[in-house]
Amino acid sequence: MLANTRLAFYACSLNALVLKQLISAFILMLHSFIVQQREFTTVFYFLVHGLYLKKYFI
């Protein structure tokens, strides 16, 4: 009985550890994706505005 409870506890804690790892990996992936998108948007914004300024004002 005690061995079963200990085994269940280990399985539960291992499950929680794996779940925590998965969640942190997912958050990290999401964060890097958002940062990449933001960098791309900034570059695109400056590129388009640079072309616009070059065409009409310079």
Image: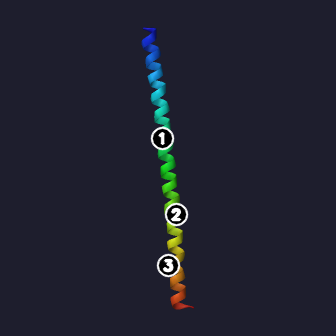
Which residue in the protein does label 3 denote? 48
Q: Amino acid at mark 1?
A: Ile
Is label 2 in a helix, a strand or a loop?
helix
In the image, residue 19 sits, relative to residue 38, either above or below, namely above
Mark number displayed over residue 38: 2
Is label 3 in a helix, a strand or a loop?
helix
Is label 1 in a helix, a strand or a loop?
helix
Q: Residue 41's spot in the image, x, y percent?
A: 50, 68
Q: How far apart are labels 1 and 2 at the CA level?
A: 22 Å
Dots 2 and 3: beta carbons under 8 Å? Answer: no
Mark number displayed over residue 23: 1
Please report whichever mark, 2 or 3, sits nearer to the chain's N-terminal start.
2
How many other residues sit within 10 Å of disc 1, few (<14), some (14-19) or many (≥20)?
Answer: few
Q: Residue 43's spot in the image, x, y percent?
A: 53, 71
Please report whichever mark, 1 or 2, sits nearer to the chain's N-terminal start.
1
Please report whichever mark, 3 or 1, sits nearer to the chain's N-terminal start.
1
Q: Amino acid at mark 2?
A: Arg
Q: How far apart are labels 3 and 1 at the CA level?
A: 37 Å
Split into 4 quadrants, where in the image is the N terminus?
Answer: top left
Q: Residue 34's spot in the image, x, y percent?
A: 50, 57
Residue farthest to the top, as pictured: 1
| Left or right of 22, for residue 53 | right
Q: How far apart are labels 2 and 3 at the CA level?
A: 15 Å
Mark number displayed over residue 3: none
| Point 52% across, 63% down: residue | 38
In the image, residue 21 sits, relative to residue 53, either above or below, namely above
Dots 1 and 2: beta carbons under 8 Å? Answer: no
How many other residues sit within 10 Å of disc 3, few (<14), some (14-19) or many (≥20)?
Answer: few
How many other residues sit within 10 Å of disc 2, few (<14), some (14-19) or many (≥20)?
Answer: few
Q: Amino acid at mark 3?
A: Val
Q: Residue 52's spot in the image, x, y percent?
A: 51, 84
